[in-house]
Every structure is written in C-alpha cells, then in structure tokens.
Image (cartoon, rainbow, N blue to C red):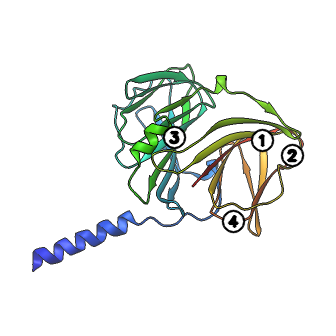
Amino acid sequence: MKRLILFTLVLFATQLKAQQTPIPSGVFHWADVPVTKNDGREGRKIIQGSTAELAYLDIHATTQLKGAAPRPPHAQTETEEFIFIKEGTAKFTIGQNSQVLGTGSLVLIPPHEMQAIQNVGDTPLTYYVFGLRAKQPADMERSAKAGGILFINADTLKYNTTKLGGRINYLNRPTATLSNLEMHMTELKGKGPAHAPHTHVDTELTLVLEGETEMIIKDKTYKAVAGDIYLMNSNELHGISNSQDKPCKYLAIRWK
C-alpha cells in the first residue's frame, strides 16, 4: 500500500511538472531578465510555458564569451529547436554538418539531432534558443519531407523593398513539431504602423532587432526595444508600429 501511495504521488508530481502554465500575451524585456554567469557564459531565461499549439515553449538566450569552450554535443528527444544569432559568429555542428554563421542567421534543429555551438569570432556570441514541444509526438517523417535540418546564412538572404521599408523572408515550411513555421524580418524606415491591427489563428512572436516599437495587443499598448520579445496568442488582435522617426527592425515568427 505504501509503495502504491508513493508511486501515485510521484506520478502526480510528474504530471504537474509536465503541465506548463499558458504564456500570457505581452512583452518580455531583455533588460528585465536575470542573468546567470559561469564558465565564460551568460544565460537568460526569457519565456517558459505553453501555447494553444504547444505543450511546451522555452525561450532562453546564451552569450558565449570569446574563447569559451563549447558544451559537449547533445540532442533533444521530443523538443525541436531553432536558434537565432543576435550578435557574433558561431560554428554550428548539427548531425554530420557544420557551418559558420553570423549575426541574423538561423538554424532549425529537429529532435534527436546531435548539436554543438562554438564561438569562433573575436567578440561575444549571443543567440536565442526557441525550444518547442508539441502536444502530439514529433512527426519526424513530416520533418524529413520538409528538409530536416536547416541552416540559414543571413548574408545570403534577399532584402525586398516595400513602401514602408523592407522585408527578408527566412522560412515558411512544416517542421517536426508544427504544421507550419513562418519567419520574416520587417524593416520600417519611418514612424507609424506596419499594418492595421489584425487577428489570425497562429500564435506569433515578434523579436525586436533594432529601434523602438509599440505593439497593440487586445486593448493594451506595449513598448519594446532591441532584444525584447512580444508574444501574441492565437486569435488576439494585435498590430505593431515604429514609435520613432528612424528605422526599426523586427523578426516575426508565426506557427500553427
């Protein structure tokens, strides 16, 4: 009987741990995130919880100082990751492939792939890690059909001029975790909105890369600068604006 009670308590605790709290819409400021430091690294835990589509979403940032030894290669089991370089130069080794990528570049890593990241530049390397775990098991066949591992070198991307500034398309494809993941960078040259407030079923993140911005989410207005992240949950009215009469840039990330 005691063993049964103990087993039940452990199972209950495990289930509670697995049930992540839904992430509220709003803004998450880079400057407000506590910093942990060790072994030539700085870590920032920015967002953790669940969304309409994801059982688990974890966003954290790591800074590797110049000369910091890379962590041993490791793999995630049910979690898919994409990594965006905020600044610096990194050597990514994913599976049997290695590439050196700079600021603004992106890597998509399906579950079960061995990975390692090394700072190979002369300055600190800072990157955001977006960890995704679906409510259903990862679909590795869908991932393989869509292309599997993806390296995106920012230097090879095309800048498309628009009436308000410009846009760079990063990707628009299924993944192991998501039926679709879409990312693009928008630049607004002057003050004003990017578009009228709107809604869509996709959950959306907006990572501010440069300048000062404002975001309407439902009935509130939030402000964010470079390094900050907005999160808009499914079907919530939202709209972003450049709050200054000088350029701003942001990375928009949508999934379903």
**First-in-chain label (4 vs 3):** 3
Q: Do the residues labelled 1 and 2 touch (CB within 8 Å)?
A: yes
Distance from label 1 to label 4 (Cα)?
A: 24 Å
Q: Is residue 221 left or right of residue 134?
A: right
Under circle 2, the secondary element is loop
Q: Find disc 4 in the rendering and name its residue.
A: 236
Q: Which mark is residue 211?
A: 1
Question: Residue at 69% of width from left, 36% of height from top?
Answer: 169
Distance from label 4 to label 3 (Cα)?
A: 24 Å
Q: Find disc 2 in the rendering and name its residue.
A: 244
What amino acid is labelled 4 in the image? Glu
**First-in-chain label (2 vs 4):** 4
Nearer mark to the viewer, of 2 and 4: 4
Say few, some or many: other residues with alpha carbon within 10 Å of mark 4 (under 14 / 14 to 19 / 20 or more).
many
Q: Find disc 3 in the rendering and name its residue.
A: 82
Say few, some or many: other residues with alpha carbon within 10 Å of mark 1 (under 14 / 14 to 19 / 20 or more).
many
**First-in-chain label (1 vs 4):** 1
Q: Can residue 210 be seen in this view?
A: no
What amino acid is labelled 3 in the image? Phe
